[in-house]
Amino acid sequence: MFDQFDALLLARFQFAFTVSFHFIFPSFSIGLASYLAVLEGLWLWTGREVYLNLFKYWLKIFALAFAMGVVSGIVMSYQFGTNWSVFSDKAGPVIGPLMAYEVMTAFFLEAGFLGIMLFGMGRVGRRLHFAATLAVAVGTFISAFWILSANSWMQTPVGYTVNEAGQFVPQDWWAIVFNPSFPYRLVHTVLAAYLTTALVVGGVGAWHLLRERTNKGARVMFSMAMGMVAVVAPLQILAGDMHGLNTLEHQPAKVMAMEGHFESHPDGAPLILFGIPDQEAGTVRNAIAIPKASSLILKHDLNAPLAGLDTVNRANWPYVPVVFWSFRIMVGLGFAMLALGLLSLWARFRGRLYDWRPLHWLALAMGPAGFVAVIAGWVTTEVGRQPFTVYGLLKTAASASPLEAPAVAASLLTFIVVYFIVFGAGTGYILKLMGKAPHPGESGPEAGREPIRTAGITPAPAVNPARTLGAEA
């Protein structure tokens, strides 16, 4: 049935599907963990109940998002052994330790304190609980640190040698971890996570303000979220520009695809806003462009020359239509976020932040925008790296396991069905929780239940005094 499909293409689609599904949850939980730490800190500092109520409100949502992120991440990692065994063999001596560091530092830290964070309020002291919340927030950042280090090394590989078996082996771990693209990618991704969370929180706040303008919890969450968007959106645009310049230096073919530059421009390259990239013809049809603006952005000089894909071996071209449009989706949404932040500042200064309904509708519409921008950014990064898994060194076609198409197709279909059922149900429940307005006396994940005891261990208060040692007959 699937013999006519290409096994390599199916394996690539499977990894793209699972990693895109997975990254939705970490991009939310990274920012939400920090937001929870801020809420709890503000409650401890000010004593205002509204911060505690919001903390408990978002804690339930964080627990679900975090759990789905962990499960989807574990499933995704198995593909390295099933569909990409050659890549695992060749790059394993470098990638393997980086992934192990993520488990030994971030995951253990999160796992050690997550239970206290979720169920410890009222059972441990306030300071200890706040420390646990901070530990989980730091753990999510450390997790992003190691995962992005590994991915960035695949984009800009340094600090390695190749042994007799053709494997990449570490030579300088400092160079590997802090490879040339890593700092830019880390900042860009973490800021994207904060923006994603701010937009979700702002969208939820806007939804409840549209229904009940006086809801104190909705007002606070909306104010905090819009303030975050106003601050982080311009920082993200600046970080993205710096990341782009770094990519131009180390992965020029990716930038050529992003810009749609099939041809070189010796006297200043145009900024192509829209068009239809034609991979076969090597041109962008019906292009709408600003003359020399691309040279100004990338080289800060209107007349600076920019090379095109005509200087690259055609066999090493990324698939330009996907990279071209995913990049524009990401950038377009970034400027839409900036506009939302500026409008919220105007409304705040005019004293209309909580009653300007057009702003609330816009914030509600922009609620999912962070997820779309994050996925578009990852598509730009990963498709732009093609046809390599380790940029310039190991091609994707040489990285795959020797599997037949039906085997890959069967696992792909299974993933699609299971993911949409399981994670669809989880996402639906998260939306249900978001649909309920925060209120005084908000309950956390532990409400109404005692911790489940381990089988065979009897809680001390339930012990029959007549059967204890030293009891009178």
Image (tube, rainbow, N blue to C red):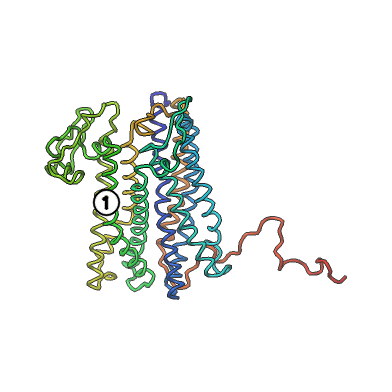
Q: Position of residue 288 (x, y in %)?
A: 14, 42
Instruction: Specify few, some or many for label 1: CA neighbours under 10 Å numbering under 14, 14-19, or 20 or more.
Output: some
**Residue 47 in the image: above or below residue 394:** below
Residue shown at 42%/29% (left/top)? 399
Q: Quadrant of the N terminus?
A: top left
In the picture as drawn, the residue positioned furthest to the right comes out as 473
**How many labels sit on residues?**
1
Please indicate whether residue 258 sits to the left or right of residue 86 in the image.
left
Please indicate whether residue 75 sits to the left or right of residue 240 in the image.
right
Q: Position of residue 332 (x, y in %)?
A: 24, 49
**Residue 243 in the image: above or below residue 360:** above
Residue 347 falls in image quadrant: bottom left
Q: Where is residue 371 in the image (x, y as percent from the top left)?
A: 35, 50
**Residue 162 in the image: above or below residue 420:** above
Residue shown at 86%/72% (left/top)? 472
Q: In which quarter of the image is the C terminus?
A: bottom right
Residue in the foreground of this view, choosing between 402 and 2: 402
In the picture as drawn, the residue positioned furthest to the bottom comes out as 47
Instruction: For mark 1, give the secondary structure.
Output: helix
Q: Where is residue 45 in the image (x, y as percent from the top left)?
A: 44, 73
Residue in the foreground of this view, choosing between 100 and 338: 100
Residue shown at 49%/48% (left/top)? 70
Residue in the foreground of this view, choosing between 456 and 74: 74
Read off the residue under disc 1.
333
Amino acid carrying mark 1 in the image: Leu
